[in-house]
Image (spheres, grey):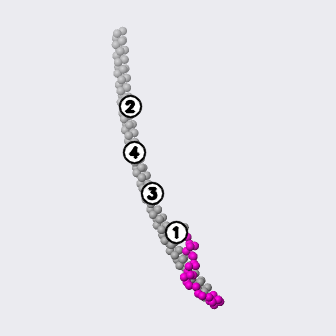
Amino acid sequence: MQELIKIVLLIAVVAAAVLASVLLLIRRLLLVDTMKALEKINQVEAEVRKREEGIRHEIEQHEKDFLKKKSDAEESLQKQKDQSEKELALLRDRITVDAKKEGEKILEQADQGSAHANPRPRRSRRIAACRISAPAALPGPADG
């Protein structure tokens, strides 16, 4: 019977040793797999950080380009506005001069026509020019 107990005890010790080796092997395999998984996760995180930084840089570049284009457009618009105001002032001056000439011409014709029908003293050109109010009828720079 003692031999039987020794054999059972020997089988139990061998089974415990095999179980311990299997557990150590499983633990080692799991540890290796875990380390590989962690390494892979770290690589993916680094790649994501690089992409994120690239996208952030791209966004900043787009914002700079947008601000530059916006300021260029504002400058262009201001130049066009200034040019339009200059052209409007020149046109207003030209219309004023033309209106004065036309007014003088009409008054001259009226004076000549009335001189034949009803002789009366001739008005001076200065008084006739004062009667023309064409510039007041045109919009000024603040109105436009």
Q: Amino acid at mark 4?
A: Arg
Q: Amino acid at mark 1?
A: Pro
Which region of the structure is painted magenta? Answer: 114-141
Q: Position of residue 144 (x, y in %)?
A: 54, 67
Report the disc number at residue 49: 4
Q: CA distance from mark 2 to mark 1?
A: 84 Å
For the residue pair 20 and 83, the one nearer the viewer reads as 83
Q: Residue at x 36, y 23 (%)?
A: 20
Q: CA distance from mark 4 to mark 1?
A: 56 Å
Q: Is any atom of residue 102 visible in this view?
A: no
Q: Residue at x 35, y 25 (%)?
A: 21
Asked if labels 1 and 2 touch by Cβ distance under 8 angstroms, the answer is: no
N-terminal label among 3 and 1: 3
Query: Label 3: few (<14), some or many (≥20) within 10 Å?
Result: few
Q: Which residue is mark 2?
A: 30
Q: Which residue is mark 3?
A: 66
